[in-house]
Amino acid sequence: MGISRVTVEAAYGQLEAEGYLARRVGQGSFVAARFARPPTETVPPLRTTALAALSQRGHQLVRGGGCSDPLTPFAFAAGSPDLRVFPHDTWRQLCNQRLRHEAATLAGYGDPQGYAPLRMAIAAYLHQACDVRGSADQVLVLTSSQQALHLLGSLLLDEGDVVWMEEPAYRGARTALAATGARLVPVPVDGEGMCPSDDLPLPRLIYLTPSHQYPTGCALSLSRRQALLEIARKQGCWIIEDDYDSEFHFDGRPHPAMQGLDRHDRVIYLGTFSKALFPSLRLAYAMLPAALLEPAITVRTLYDGHSNQLMQAVTADFINRGHFATHLRYMRQLYRSRRDLLLDEITAKLSHLLRIHPSPGGLQVLVELPPGSETRLTRQAQAVGVATPGLQSLYLTPPGRDGWLLGFAALSMDKIRAGVHRLQVLRADLPFTD
Ligand SMILES: Cc1ncc(COP(=O)(O)O)c(C=O)c1O
């Protein structure tokens, strides 16, 4: 190689020091035994090795299939906000201002409970927007609602504990709470939300989406809210109120949060900026009962320590300077007009195929399909290039009702029209019977 003996000696010395070579005086230098592999040995595929090494819980988590969100909006993938109309220039200016003055501080480790000015902004916003009670001291900032659900599951549930789940329910919540080994008990949802019967086993935790039930979109009625709060009080159990998209309520006045009705500190309120701002921000929050605050902060330190400090600071500025309120007002109008267009188009062109399930808000519309037709119609829709997220898989105990959850928020008017137009060729075997 035309290099000096000193260089070669240094390289061999380094390899020996790192454990890659074994050097024996008078014999030579050899690849260290732990790196040498008999030529006949076949390497098992990594996938199998990794799965074989999983715990029971790990297997269960993997079998659950995880949760995934669409990377780019397309008709009719559910749950994506429209990011093209986000005020990116304002956001950039706020980032620059913060970086100019506090780059070093914001680059360091942060408070595990969350950046204090953001916690103050969240507490004030929640109080004004949906009557959530509690101060900035009770706010815990997290990366996502999904992280909050995992954290609360591990903090509050033991193996076999009963959790009442809405049926059908948000898959993310189901998988996060099931991961604790808790026993998930499906509780049917009707037009007034979760409807528990007297014969259910008593819960340790109740998971709810009261403002727009996911996926049916209905609101939990006041009498049901009161009844569930009473069960929580008597039983000493917790209620998770997952308020994932109440910012987007279009028809009539939204219900105030259930947490605001709770006089016995049983409700944990969760919110996220994934839809109201943008998903990759990775910021969500919990308003916690005082008794859970210290334990939850401690467990948060065991996850990822804290959320991105710069993004927390910029989000606080975005809220405090009025941009958040302006953005929400604009998005509400935009989404409402898209929702109305989708409903009109479906009514005019697809009523032979499906029935609309009315909802006062949200980023997707639930439609019901003739019983037994979801799988076949979904395949037909795929064949014409339209995604139609199914309802069946959101049931804990199949068979559930057949339907689709059609996302509209991120789609232009043209895309909505084109998507419905393509679905017109679909034919159900059975007509809809009312
Ligand atoms: C009921 C519900 N909760 C939470 C989330 C997700 O929020 P995050 O992105 O903060 O995990 C969603 C997303 O669609 C949802 O439907």
Image: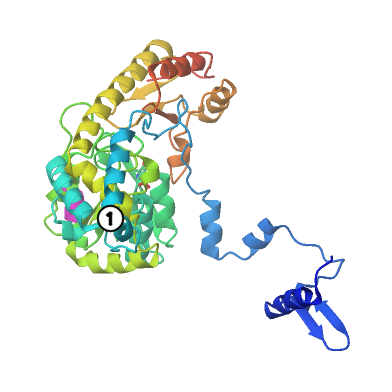
Specify whether 13 is left or right of 221: right
The quadrant of the rendered image in which ligand 1 is seen is: top left
Please report the residue visible at 27 percent of the width from the left and 69 percent of the height from the top: 295
Residue 19 x %, y %:
70, 78
Kind of residue sitting beneath label 1 = Glu
Towards the viewer: 200 or 318: 318
Q: Assign the C terminus to one quadrant of the image.
A: top left
Left or right of 36, for residue 377:
left
Give yes or no for residue 227 being in the magenta stretch: yes
Residue 243 lies in quadrant: top left
Stretch of the chain drawn in magenta: 226-231
Q: How many marks?
A: 1
Which residue does the numbered mark 1 point to in the structure image? 102
Q: Is residue 80 above or below residue 336?
A: below
- Is disc 1 surrounded by few (<14), some (14 to 19) or many (20+) residues within 10 Å? few
Point out residue 158 in the picture as x, y percentages from the top left corner: 37, 67
Tell me where residue 69 appears, x and y as whole percent.
46, 40
Look at the numbered disc 1 and say if its residue's Cβ is closer than 8 Å to ligand 1: no
**Residue 241 visible here:** no
> In this rendering, is residue 67 above or below 9?
above
Element type where label 1 sits in the image: helix
* Display coloring: rainbow
Left or right: where does residue 428 sit relative to residue 368? Answer: right
Q: Nearer the viewer, residue 390 or 50?
A: 50
Q: Is residue 71 above or below residue 236?
A: above
Residue shown at the point (53%, 24%) measured from the top left: 377
Q: Is residue 372 left or right of residue 86?
A: right
Q: Position of residue 331 (x, y in %)?
A: 27, 29
